Amino acid sequence: MSDRENILNAVRKALESTGDAKSACTLPELSRPRLEGTQETLIGRFIEEVEAVSGRVHRLANIDSAARQLETLIRAGKTESLAVSRDPIARAISSRVLGRHVVVDPEDNQDAIAEADMGLTGVRLAIAEHGTLMLAPEDDHGRLAALLPPHHVAVLAVSQLVGTLAEAIEHLASDSQPATITFVSGPSRTADIEQTLVIGIHGPALLDILLIEDTQEEDHPS
Amino acid sequence: MSTIHDIRSSHFKSDAREAIANVELRGALARAQEQSNSKRDRAIQRIADDWESMRDQASAIKTWTLENLGEQLELFERNAVKNGIQVHWAEDAENACRLVNEICADAEARSVIKSKSMVTEEIGLNHTLEAAGLEVVESDLGEWIVQIAGETPSHIVAPAIHHTRESIHRLFEETLGRKIPTDAESMTMVAREVLRQAFLRADVGITGVNYLVAETGSFLVLENEGNQRLTTSLPRVHIAVSGIEKIVPRLADLDLFLRMIGRSGTGQVVTTYQNLFCGPRRSPDEDGPRDMHMVLVDNGRTKLLASEKRRQTLQCIRCGACLNICPVYRQIGGHAYGSVYPGPIGSIFTPQVAGLHKASQLPFASSLCGACKDVCPVKIDIPGILLDLREEIAEHGEGQRDQETELKMKRESPAFRRWSSLMQSPRKYRMSGALVRTMALIASHTSLFDRFIPPLSAWRSTRSVPRPEGGSFRARWRRRTEANR
Ligand code: SF4
């Protein structure tokens, strides 16, 4: 017999021996927590939670102001190269910024992204209650851009913000599930050396979120 | 045969004595425990009103799932296969290791990168892979420290908790053969550099699992460092290894468990990263693994299902809270337990999985203070199961215990039998608690107790009685939550 059959048989035999207790037990209904309040409340909570885990949120009116903010971050971090995912908003913003860009494309090799100082990506949605970004790499091919460079900048439209993790999971259940979903709450951290918190170990050490009110592309004078 | 790799729990007594004599270790443990407990308290106070009902729900979900384990596992398998995940089953440690080895051989792998996983420690996977000529690198900082020190983890969440900064610094300089700065931040950055190279050359990434989701055939793994994201993004092949008990029925159940596990374990509201895997890479993502494997491991777990009480052991979500609160763990650390699962959960898991004869002293490595049961997010009755195991050892003595335990049994069993009856009734338990606290207060000040009051004198000869701090844990807990409202 295969290991599979042996295990399943052993499970069945063990549980049959205590058969009668089983009928009494039911699977509990879940309380699905929601955040009360207006969109402004959600935004406030989101910013508070992101900051509590050492991330930063920048509230921006539109793509132009987001581009200016990105430029400020690039200058402040002495960023030399930027890896940009295929997210259309991320592309629109980065196209307004001068500098050496690694635009992530299929032909691109891992090494170019690994050497970039900053990665710019979109997100599937964001969760206010824990200050969480939900990344789905197959949306914008941003898997490595959000992971390898020491600085991750994520682009988020206000309309992508939901209140609770329970809501985000409901979204997932209704869509077809992407191959990988990563929930990100703040930059990478460790406390393995004498419980001393160190921000930035394997993942990005800096997390900046560009929270944009209006992501419509206006006609841009070139 | 189910077994736990490198088990030496039959040396518990001598190992514990050695650990107690190690001043550096005890200092490191005390500091670490205090810090994790106060972080946990703060994280839970924020949701104090809901915490108890969350525990009830989490426990009920786990109970239901274990009672329907066969169907849930088959459902998981069906859905996972639909998602393109290759599902394998392993009855014991040996078969699990062989399976992983074969997958690596098929992938023509030379280098393997791992992110923290207790079940792979349990089955001794690294050992097998290295014997087959593979390079195996642990990428979680704590695990890496333990790996280069040639040790096993001493805590299920913080593997290197027994090390001080100085000892880690010594280890890094010796291993890397160069001078490095002594502060935690610089040492961490050195580890980042060294391990990044290991990620880039790895052919296979191996992770554990926190939750298998039956209804979607996907699985979730938690972390803080980003090493697991790298482990599952850069190598061509991802192999996940999971105990069969790690299953939850619904995707929506994750919400509850994710809200609890961070708070319980590290005092975080949620862990930094939570990775949900639902199959190998899909276009247009060209970077994920091409192949994804799931190895479902029994290794003795099905033996625990037959008893309703003992089955609870399998509800464990490996948060580490019971280790952090345990006064015995605080004194001796993880290694003295002689098993990759130390502390209160280890004292019930190890003897049941590896066999009582391999770890007959562990069920006695507890003062039955009940703190572990009070903090456990899934409400496992650890003291109750410990008593149950003690009883079995007492009844089926021959062959189930070594000489050391035999002797202890003779001295302690009448007292513990009375204790056992007290534990069955909450009212009697509370009353006896007050009595014991009063007696302990006297005992901590005087040695009279030791000499004149058997059987406590026998018990006391190997233990120092802790001075009770103002009232029962329950009462203190209540006061603390009230003070913070
Ligand atoms: S037994 Fe409970 S407290 Fe201990 S690790 Fe498991 S879930 Fe956490």
Image (cartoon, helix red, strand yellow):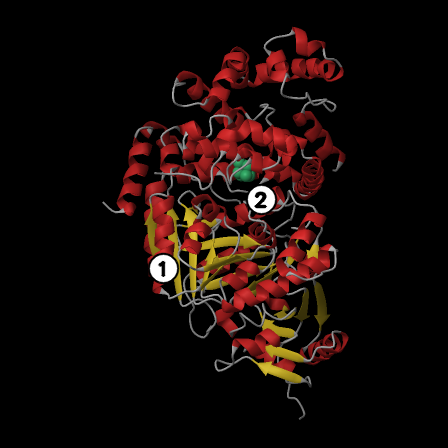
Residue in the foreground of this view, choosing between A75 and B171:
B171
Instruction: Say which residue appears at 61% left-offset and 28% top-offset.
Output: B17
Asked if badge 2 and badge 1 are on a common chain, one would say yes
Can you identify the residue that label 1 sits on? Answer: B103
Where in the figure is residue A150, as x and y percent of width and height? 65, 69
Percent x, y for residue B295? 38, 52
Q: Nearer the viewer, residue A91 or B395?
A: B395
Q: Determine which of the numbered discs, if any, sits on residue A137 in the image.
A: none
User: What residue sits 37% from the left and 65% below the top?
Assistant: B107
Q: Nearer the viewer, residue B283 or A213?
A: B283
Give how far across and how far down residue B178 sits, in percent.
Answer: 68, 62
Quarter where residue B15 is shown: top right
Other-residue count near label 2 (Cα within 10 Å), few / some / many at <14 / 14–19 / ≥20? many
Residue A131 visible, this angle: no
Look at the image and tell me in which quarter the N terminus of chain A lies: top left
In the picture of the structure, the residue carrying the numbered disc 2 is B260
Q: Residue furthest left?
A: A1
**Is the C terminus of chain A in the top left, top right, bottom left or bottom right quadrant?**
bottom right
